[in-house]
Image (tube, grey):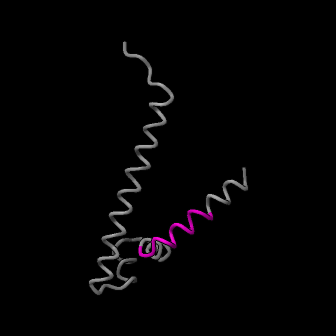
Amino acid sequence: MTEPMSDGEIRQIRKDYDEDIERAMQRRDERLRAAIASGRKQVDLVRLMDMSREAIRQALNPEAREAVRAARAAKKQGGE
C-alpha cells in the first residue's frame, strides 16, 4: 500500500492547475490580439470564440484584466 499524499502535495495539484490555466489564457490572449492586429474585429472574436464582449475586452487589454482581478480580490478580502 502506498502512503497517502500529504496536504502539501494535494495543494500543489491546485497550484499547478492554476498556473497551467494562466499560461493557456496568456497564449490565447496573445493570439486574439494577433487576430485584431491582422484586421479582424472584436465582434468577430465574440462570435467565433463564443465569449462575452467583456471577456474579449479583457483578453485584448491585459491592464483591464488586472484591474478586474484586483477589484475581485479586494471585494473577496472585504467580504471575509
Please, is residue 6 above or below residue 24 in the view? above
Picture quadrant where residue 36 is located: bottom left
Q: How many marks can you see?
A: 0
Task: Name the image quarter holding the N terminus.
Answer: top left
Answer above or below: position of 4 versus 32.
Answer: above
Q: Position of residue 74 (x, y in %)?
A: 66, 59
Report x, y in % for residue 48: 33, 75
Is 69 one of the magenta-colored residues? yes
Identified at 49% across, 36% down, the residue is 11
Q: Which residues are magenta?
A: 60-71
Q: Is residue 44 left or right of residue 55?
A: left
Q: Is residue 38 left or right of residue 62?
A: left
Quarter of the figure with residue 5: top left
The answer to whether 20 is drawn above or below residue 53 in the figure is: above
Q: Quadrant of residue 27?
A: bottom left
Q: Position of residue 6 (x, y in %)?
A: 47, 25
**Could you say which is closer to the camera, residue 50 or residue 73?**
73
Q: Residue at x 35, y 85 (%)?
A: 41
Q: Residue at (72%, 54%) from the top-left corner?
A: 79
- The residue furthest left is 38
Task: Check if residue 53 falls in the magenta segment.
Answer: no
Residue 59 in the figure: left or right of residue 35: right
The percent coordinates of residue 78 (x first, y second) are 73, 56
